[in-house]
Amino acid sequence: MDSEKDFLENYKLSDYERPSVTADVAAFMIGSEDSSNYRRNPENKLMLLLIKRGRHPFKDKWALPGGFLNKGETIEECALREIEEETSVLPVSIMPVGTFSEPERDPRGWIISNAYVSIISEESVKQVGRDDASDAQWFSVSFDRSDSGEYHLVLSCGDIELRARLAEEKTSFGRTRFRIIESGGLAFDHAAIISAALTALRAEARNYDTIFDFLPEKFTLTSLQKVQETIMNINILPANFRRMVSGYVEETDEFVRGEGHRPAKLYRRKS
Amino acid sequence: MDSEKDFLENYKLSDYERPSVTADVAAFMIGSEDSSNYRRNPENKLMLLLIKRGRHPFKDKWALPGGFLNKGETIEECALREIEEETSVLPVSIMPVGTFSEPERDPRGWIISNAYVSIISEESVKQVGRDDASDAQWFSVSFDRSDSGEYHLVLSCGDIELRARLAEEKTSFGRTRFRIIESGGLAFDHAAIISAALTALRAEARNYDTIFDFLPEKFTLTSLQKVQETIMNINILPANFRRMVSGYVEETDEFVRGEGHRPAKLYRRKS
DNA sequence: CAAATAGTGTCTCTAAGACAATATCAC
DNA sequence: GTGATATTGTCTTAGAGACACTATTTG
């Protein structure tokens, strides 16, 4: 009887065909838009990073950043690498959204995708600066369920507007899958991946540990509240938000001044 | 400039090496053990299906059921197929646990695993009958965090006892990863997969929609309560459990009789 | 002072937890 | 009747939501 060592020395992975494996990342940021009124706080929008494809298939369509898994790295490392390549920012953490493995999902052949959500702070993106000639752009996101039960995903960036329509396919264990009715100019099955990522992010956003990643180290409680409100598309009364978050943050002795109204104290995340 | 059609006709996936992709499934069941006292209700235990490996590597070690992804199927279909092959039971639903892709996780080579939790009712397993000569066995599960912060996973089946020790590697977005300190006779990185699966199952078990899958169509509220208590390792007062689950179930007009105490009404899940 | 946000105090309401009491069966 | 589980009623409590009020800045 062969020893395990002998076995492994002679072992060859069978010649069955193998799939190509990719990681695709839905990278979200909270973007702030200055308002006309000097004393008003900026409006916040949930933004998603998309890349304009330079080659077939889906040439000139918009797609999530992503790429093939290299030998010697984990899928998480691959996902982080792809985001860093596109944004020059290394996200603090990523969250798995699911594996997309329908055999026909990629016209190039058998390619399965591991999808992740990543969260990036606007501050870190601004520090890096942006190459406006680049094919990577941040799109503002709107995602709603219509009365008919259909979901509408709208991504806008300047004059570009991508409108996808989807149906809820199944929800099990709190995870929702979507079927694309109309891709709205998004490549591959990325409209379905983005919808699943948004659903996962919204569910996760009630967890304060998650939303800190959208902000710099020091932040005001109002800005933290705006992050949660923007992602979950809800309104929270300030008094209640402050009470609920109080266990997760600690005061600094710094203030934000020059805003045309009472200065807000800066807080940091409690360790 | 080539059309997309031309492009795809000439496209070949690059010759980069590709990983083999597997689905591994942690299939759980709630097993009941008759007690000595005729009027006492049976004790419940959380059980996990393991397969004794017949070949290298890890020959004669215990492993999760699983297998390679075939061309033309999704990973979810692959996971369901593997469970049906081993148990003759097709689970109602499966929950993704994560992708395990550390390059060194499988001594045979570059093999990445997509892990799932599945839930099987004891009734459906009993109906199928069990082949006692088979290498597939149900192990009772215990999984606790020790005072030192280490996690102890103990799997027992008759005289066989597998004791693994693990450390919490990182928890992000509510998902916990484990590092194996001592595999306890489990194959590959399956001790870490089982730990992640158990953690996910425990978190999910507070959702009533999930725990119904452990029971037959008609069940007593006490049995449903025992399922939740067994998985989450907690005790719930019956009055409170009934109040909380009342919106999810509806009465039938049947009762369980002959138990040596007051008969319990059978309920079914509300649509 | 006006406009805007920052921040606090407290009432209400709901859902979960605790606990006591009653109901019904097999032996 | 006894011993067990089944089932119901209600008191208490913790936390979320609503709302009114005060504080502080810039122009």
Image (tube, coloured by chain):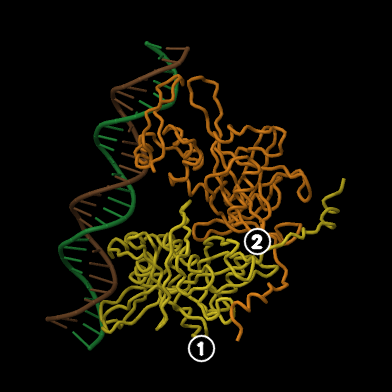
Chain colours: A yellow, B orange, C brown, D green
Discs 1, 2 touching: Cβ within 8 Å: no
Name the one closer to the observer, B1 or B228: B1
* Quadrant in the picture for the C terminus of chain B: top left
> In the rendered image of this protein, does residue B227 appear above or below residue B65?
above
Q: Residues within 10 Å of mark 2 (few under 14, many from 20)?
A: many
Q: Nearer the viewer, residue D24 or B93?
A: B93
Residue A4, image x, y percentages: 82, 51
The x, y position of residue A92, in whole percent, is: 52, 69
Q: Give the label, 1 or 2, closer to the camera.
A: 1
Residue A133 numbered tag: 1
How many numbered marks appear? Answer: 2
Q: Which three-letter amino acid code belongs to the residue tagged 1?
A: Ala
Specify the quadrant that holds the N terminus of chain B.
Answer: bottom right
Residue A124 place in picture, x, y as percent: 48, 78
Q: Which mark is residue A260?
A: none
The one nearer the camera, C7 or B261, is B261
Q: Amino acid at mark 2?
A: Ser
State left or right for residue A174 relative to residue B31: left
Q: Place residue A46 in its image quadrant.
A: bottom left
Estimate the x, y position of residue A156 in percent, counting from the top left.
40, 77
Judging from the image, mark 1 belongs to the subunit labelled A
- Give the residue number, with chain letter if any, for mark 2: B101
Q: Mark 1 and mark 2: span between their CA atoms?
A: 35 Å
